[in-house]
Image (spheres, rainbow, N blue to C red):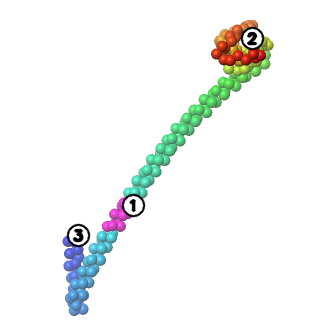
Amino acid sequence: MRRIARILLIVIGGCASGIAQQQNNPVQSFLDSFYAARRLRQQQERFKAEQAQRNMEMQLRMEQAQTEMRLQQRQQDASASQAQGEKEMREKQFELEKLRLELEKQRLAPGNLSGITVRFASTPANAEVDVDGIYWGTTPTADLKRLPAGTHTVVVKKIGHKPWERKIDLAAGDDRTVNAELEVDSTKPHISGLN
């Protein structure tokens, strides 16, 4: 750097001395060349400082852009994962709803194509009857002819008694009465008049 400044000083000094000789003022000529070299050096230093500042700003912008891109990618990944989970949940809910509707359709179907007739009775009477988680009435029930053939879970329950639960297998043409003997639940308080 100093070497360049010296060369410039000599070159400028030579030019300035030519001009100075024309003006016949050697001191002025020296000062002009000195100040010209100093201005050039200041311009170079200012240019370097500005270039360093621009480089630092550019690097900062690049790091900021990379950080934003990583954040967007993480958000997209999270959204995609959440959307996939929501889609799977909706599909499962749809399947469950289809099954529920199919069971309800079978339960409400007119007529008895399989010829199955089932009645439920209990001791004590007036207990609730659930078949496969669906309420069917209270005991004693009328003839139920809408149950399809297959295995069914029957729960008979009454306040103050232990629930009675059994699995029953029904085949086409069955005509059956299911009797449930409910036991008093001694762990729960008994209120008279509710039997």
Residue closest to the eye, 112 or 169: 169
Kindly check if marks 3 and 2 are in contact, taking CB atoms under 8 A apart as contact: no
Residue 1 is labelled as 3
Tell me the crowding category of disc 1: few under 14, some 14 to 19, or many 20 or more residues within 10 angstroms, Cα based: few
Cα gap from disc 3 to disc 2, whole angstroms = 110 Å
Q: Residue at x 63, y 27 (%)?
A: 95
Number of numbered markers: 3
In front of the other: label 1 or label 2? Answer: 2
Residue identifier under label 1: 57
- Where does the image place residue 186, in percent across and percent down from the top left? 66, 13
Comes first in the chain, label 3 or label 1:
3
Give the residue type that dot 1 points to: Glu
* Residue 171, above or below 59: above
Kindly check if marks 3 and 1 are in contact, taking CB atoms under 8 A apart as contact: no
Task: Based on the picture, tell me whether residue 50 belongs to the magenta stretch.
Answer: yes
Asked if residue 59 lies left or right of residue 158, the reply is: left
Residue identifier under label 2: 124
- Where does the image place residue 150, in percent across and percent down from the top left? 67, 13
Quarter of the image where the N terminus is located: bottom left
Q: Based on the displayed image, in which of its 4 quarters is residue 112 positioned?
A: top right
Residue closest to the eye, 139 or 89: 139
Residue 78 is labelled as none
- Where does the image place residue 23, in percent across and percent down from the top left? 24, 92
Comes first in the chain, label 1 or label 2:
1
